[in-house]
Amino acid sequence: MPKKRFIWCIALLVSSGLYAQPALKPFPQHTIYTAGSIIPNHVNRENLDNSVRAFYREWKRRYVKTVAGKNQSYIWFERPGNKQCVSEGQGYGMIIVPLMAGADPSAKAVYDALFRYYRAHPAKRGQYLMSWAQNAKGNNLDHSSAADGDIDIAYSLLLADKQWGSKGTINYLKEARVLIGDIMRYEINQQTFTVLLSNEVEADSKDYFDTRPSDFMPSHFKAFKAATGDSRWDKVTNNTYRLFALMQQQYSPDAGLLPDFIQQVNHHPHPAKAMYLETKYDGYYNYNACRVPWRITADYLLYGDARAKAISTKINHWVRLTTKDNPDNISAGYTLAGNDLPARYFEALSFIAPFAVAATAEAKNQQWLNHTWDYLVHFKIKDYDYYDNSIKMLNMIILSGNYWKG
C-alpha cells in the first residue's frame, strides 16, 4: 500500500472511532468503595456487570444522537416539546460514556463528539458554560446555563483525562479546569458558597440566596479542588452539608428529605414556596430532589465523608419503613414529612434508583438493596424517558461497584 494511502486510512479509522484508543480504566473497574459500604450480593459480579453492559447498549442506541453534517453528538431530550437537548442530559451522557469505556470500544469517539456539541453551545456569561437547552433545529433557546449540567460536564472531563489522558486532540484536563473556573465564578454564590441555579443569577437578583439541593455534588467538588487547587470548593462542600443538616432537622426530622428548592440560605433557609420556579411541589421532595440520595451517597462511597452517611442513613431508615421493605411501594414524590404526594402511586426510576444507591452506605440494608436492584433492572427502556433512563444508567454503574473518582 502506498505510504500516503496508508496514512489516509489510519486517519480515517481514528476519526471514525474504529481505531479505538485503549482505556486506562476499562469497565468493569470493581472499585473498592469506603469500608462498610455494600453492593448487591445475591448475584455475582459478572451478572452485575452484564446487566450494566446490556442497559448501556440500549441507552446509547436510544439517546446518543449525531448532528447531521457535523462531528457532534447530543443526548436526546425525548420529552414532548421543542427541545433537542438540555445540558443536564448532556452532563449525564458525558459521565456515563467514559465510565463505560472498555465495554464500548468507541467510547472515546462518542465522548469527543458529545464534547464538541457542548462547546458549540456556550452560555453568554461564562464562555465555558453550556447554554441550558437547544431546540429541534439545534439552536440555543437562550443563553442562560443550568448549574447541574455544567457541574456534571466538568466532572466528566476529569473522568476523560483519567480514562484517555489529555495529550490528544482535546486536552480534557485543561478544558475541565477552565470550565470549573467558570462554574465557580458564575454559578457559585460568593457570599454563602452555595450553588446558584444559573449563570443569570447575580448578586442583586432576588434568588441569589436560593439553591437547588440536587445541584450539590460533593464528590464532584472534591475532585474540582484536587484538579485546580482552589480551596473555595471546600467552602461549597462544608456550607452545603451544614445547610442540609439544618433542613433535615427543622423540616424533615423523620424522613430526612430535602426539597426541590431552598430559599434564603443566607439568613432563614426554608423550603421554596409553591410555584417558586417549576411546580406547586417546589418545596417538596419531587423530581429535582429525588437525585439527592444518589449525589450524597456517592460522596460517602468514594470519599467516606461521615456527613454523607448521616444524611443517607436517615433517608434509608425512613424509606424502608414507609415502603415496608418493598420497592414496589416507592412513590414518585413525597412531602418533607414523608407522605406520598397525591396521585403519585406509580414507578419512577428517578426516585427508585437513588434510593437504591443510598442503601449502599450500610450493611444492614443488604436485603433491601438486593430487592431494589432486581426491581430497578427489570423495567424496560421503552417505558420511560431520557431522565428516568439516564439516572437509572448512572446509578446502575454505581450500584455495580464500577464508579470511580474523577
Image (tube, rainbow, N blue to C red):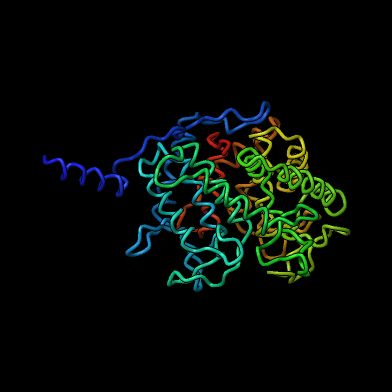
- The quadrant of the rendering that contains the N terminus is top left
The quadrant of the image that shows the C terminus is top right
Q: Nearer the viewer, residue 381 or 330?
A: 381
Please say whether residue 298 is visible from this viewpoint.
no
Closer to the camera in the image, 191 or 49: 191
Quarter of the image for residue 396 reads: top right
Query: Which residue is at a point 44% across and 54% down the rendered structure image?
Result: 114
279 lies left or right of 83: right
- Of residues 181 and 34, the one nearer the viewer is 181
Q: Residue at x 42, y 72 (%)?
A: 137
| Farthest residue, direction left | 1
Q: Is residue 305 left or right of residue 157?
A: right
Image location (x, y in percent) of residue 224: 63, 43
Q: Position of residue 82 (x, y in %)?
A: 49, 73
The number of discs equals 0
Q: Position of residue 154 (x, y in %)?
A: 57, 49
The residue shown at (68%, 27%) is 36
Vertical side of 234 occupied by 45: above or below? above
Horizontal side of 250 relative to 322 (left or right) equals right
